[in-house]
Image: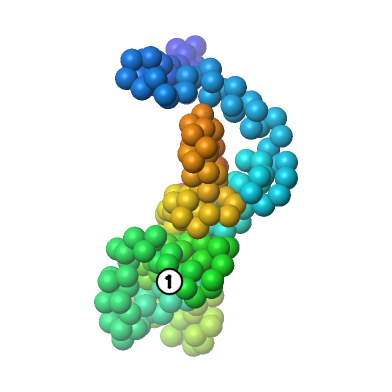
């Protein structure tokens, strides 16, 4: 009984208390410091309006918030999977080859700290369209954690594993499939989870600059219309989608990562 009460307190009471404190601070700030900030009630009403028909389509510049999130997710997943296709082989090569690591390491260390949005003009110059440019930015954002974590995972494989592969006379493909990928998988999954979380944050900023459709452009468009209540609703949606993406990756990691069983 005591354990049940402690569980309820930890899972329900404490988070509820935190949300109530945030709402109280919001209401106090709106009534004293920032009267232009929408009230909690106005934001709730706007959320009800937006979610009453989230997938309406009145043309390219007037779509429901459901379509905005869908387009953003499509760009994030497109760039993310492209980064997987390129990043995992490069990471495997860097992990197994000292020459490859020395050749690619300096370039990656120079490019990795560059802000993803700095690549947006390059994407627009190369592709001259919004969608491929946004996917290009997500690709650049996602690829570094995948490469570095894959490489680190391969380097952490015990030498005994490789000795066994020589004894069994496995070819390169068999070594990759039976030893490198399974042994490095925990590091790779950690890199994927980091990449996906960062990619979702970056797409919002990228879409604010590129325009078109997407949750980032929705935020910017509502700001131009001085509709701050819509922006607050969009911020909540962005956070919830980020939680959903992280939860999916966590489930995949628990399913595939043998170190968490």
Q: Position of residue 67 (x, y in %)?
A: 66, 46
Looking at the picture, does residue 210 appear above or below residue 204?
A: below
Left or right side of 206 for 70: right
Left or right side of 230 for 48: right
Classify residue 24 by image quadrant: top left
Q: How many marks?
A: 1
Between residues 187 and 70, which one lies in front from this camera angle?
70
Residue beneath the point at 41% across and 16% down: 27
Q: Position of residue 69 (x, y in %)?
A: 60, 46
Between residues 258 and 83, which one lies in front from this camera angle?
83
Which residue is the site of mark 1? Answer: 122
The answer to whether any part of residue 6 appears in the image is no
The answer to whether any part of residue 62 appears in the image is yes
Left or right side of 156 for 229: right
Residue beneath the point at 45% across and 81% down: 165
Classify residue 153 by image quadrant: bottom left
Between residues 6 and 66, which one lies in front from this camera angle?
66
**As drawn, which residue projects farthest toward the front?**
225
Residue beneath the point at 59% across and 26% down: 46
User: Badge 1: how crowded within 10 Å, few (<14), some, or many (20+)?
Assistant: some
**As drawn, which residue projects farthest toward the top?**
1
Q: Disc 1 on helix, strand or loop?
A: helix
Residue beneath the point at 68% across and 37% down: 54
Rendering colour mode: rainbow
Q: Position of residue 159 (x, y in %)?
A: 34, 75
Q: Position of residue 144 (x, y in %)?
A: 39, 66
């Amino acid at each position: 009984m005591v354990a049940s009460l402690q569980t309820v307190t930890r899972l329900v009471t404490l988070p509820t208390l935190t949300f109530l404190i945030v709402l109280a601070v919001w209401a106090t700030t709106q009534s004293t410091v920032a009267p232009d900030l929408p009230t909690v009630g106005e934001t709730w009403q706007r959320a009800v309006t937006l979610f009453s028909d989230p997938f309406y389509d009145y043309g390219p510049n007037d779509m429901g918030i459901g379509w905005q999130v869908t387009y953003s997710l499509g760009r994030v997943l497109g760039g993310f999977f492209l980064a997987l296709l390129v990043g995992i082989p490069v990471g495997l090569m860097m992990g197994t080859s000292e020459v490859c690591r020395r050749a690619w390491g300096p370039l990656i260390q120079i490019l990795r700290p560059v802000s993803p949005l700095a690549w947006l003009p390059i994407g627009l110059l190369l592709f001259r369209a919004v969608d491929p440019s946004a996917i290009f930015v997500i690709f650049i954002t996602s690829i570094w954690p995948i490469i570095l974590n894959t490489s680190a995972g391969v380097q952490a494989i015990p030498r005994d594993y490789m000795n066994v592969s020589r004894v069994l006379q496995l070819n390169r493909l068999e070594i990759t499939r039976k030893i490198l990928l399974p042994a490095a998988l925990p590091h790779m999954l950690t890199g994927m989870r980091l990449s996906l979380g960062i990619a979702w944050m970056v797409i919002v900023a990228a879409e604010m600059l590129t325009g078109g459709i997407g949750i980032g452009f929705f935020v910017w468009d509502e700001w131009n219309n001085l509709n701050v209540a819509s922006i607050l609703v969009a911020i909540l949606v962005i956070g919830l989608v980020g939680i959903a993406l992280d939860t999916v990756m966590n489930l995949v990691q628990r399913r595939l990562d043998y170190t968490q069983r």
